[in-house]
């Protein structure tokens, strides 16, 4: 009778261990919302100019200004250069409180002999890219991207109103 009880107990232990393994392998992680991230995609044409070293469409000194829902800058991400021809930056995690981003960059690196010229001033995207929660937001920079030489955190409509009526919003 001792042998039958031992087999019975062993069978129950194996059953319980299997049940515990099944329960612990089914975690709540599967139900979590995917992370919100972004990447910069440089679709500028690689049109190098032999007269100007480094001028090949690469985005240098890339800084991404992360904005909250009020439009305030709450974080700055400094990224590695993003080369032309479809190169992408590494994925950057986006915190829950970040709703939009503005991308800035230069066309030439510090190593360039004409780095300090006005034509190499920092550029900023006019568009404030909305972060879609739970997705990898691809921000494309190309020859059609509207850029400016100042960081404007107010919407274009607000800026037009301010200019037209000389008011501070």
Image (spheres, rainbow, N blue to C red):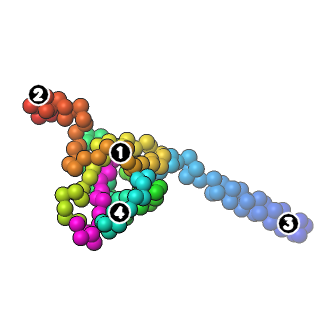
Circle 3 Cα neighbour tier, 10 Å, few/some/many (<14 / 14–19 / ≥20): few
Q: Distance between the Cα atoms at labels 3 and 1?
A: 73 Å
Range of magenta residues: 100-114
On the image, numbered disc 2 is attached to which residue?
Answer: 165
On the image, numbered disc 4 is attached to which residue?
Answer: 49
Image-quadrant location for residue 160: top left
Front residue of 54/139: it is 54
User: In the rendering, which numbered label is found on residue 145?
Assistant: 1
Marked residue nearer the N-terminal end (2 or 1): 1
The local secondary structure at tag 3 comes to helix
Magenta stretch contains residue 111:
yes
Circle 4 Cα neighbour tier, 10 Å, few/some/many (<14 / 14–19 / ≥20): few
Marked residue nearer the N-terminal end (4 or 2): 4
Q: From the viewer's perspective, is the residue at label 4 or at label 1 nearer?
A: 4
Q: Distance between the Cα atoms at labels 3 and 4?
A: 81 Å
Marked residue nearer the N-terminal end (2 or 3): 3
Q: How many marks overall?
A: 4
Answer left or right for 113 relative to 127.
Answer: left
Q: Distance between the Cα atoms at labels 4 and 1?
A: 21 Å
What percent of the width, then of the height, locates residue 151? 22, 48
Q: Distance between the Cα atoms at labels 2 and 3?
A: 89 Å
**Residue 64 visible in the shown view:** yes
On the image, numbered disc 3 is attached to which residue?
Answer: 7
């Amino acid at each position: 009778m001792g042998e039958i009880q031992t087999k019975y107990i062993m069978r129950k232990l194996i059953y319980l261990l299997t049940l515990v393994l099944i329960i612990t392998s089914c975690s709540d992680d599967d139900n979590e919302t995917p992370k919100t991230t972004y990447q910069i995609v440089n679709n500028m044409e690689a049109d190098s100019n032999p007269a100007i070293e480094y001028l090949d469409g690469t985005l240098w000194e890339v800084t991404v200004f992360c904005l909250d829902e009020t439009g305030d800058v709450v974080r700055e991400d400094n990224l590695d250069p993003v080369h032309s021809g479809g190169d992408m930056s590494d994925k950057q995690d986006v915190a829950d409180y970040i709703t939009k981003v503005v991308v800035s960059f230069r066309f030439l690196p510090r190593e360039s002999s004409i780095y300090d010229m006005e034509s190499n001033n920092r550029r900023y995207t006019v568009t404030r890219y909305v972060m879609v929660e739970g997705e990898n937001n691809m921000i494309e920079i190309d020859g059609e991207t509207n850029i400016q030489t100042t960081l404007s955190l107010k919407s274009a409509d607000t800026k037009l109103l301010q200019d037209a009526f000389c008011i501070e919003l």
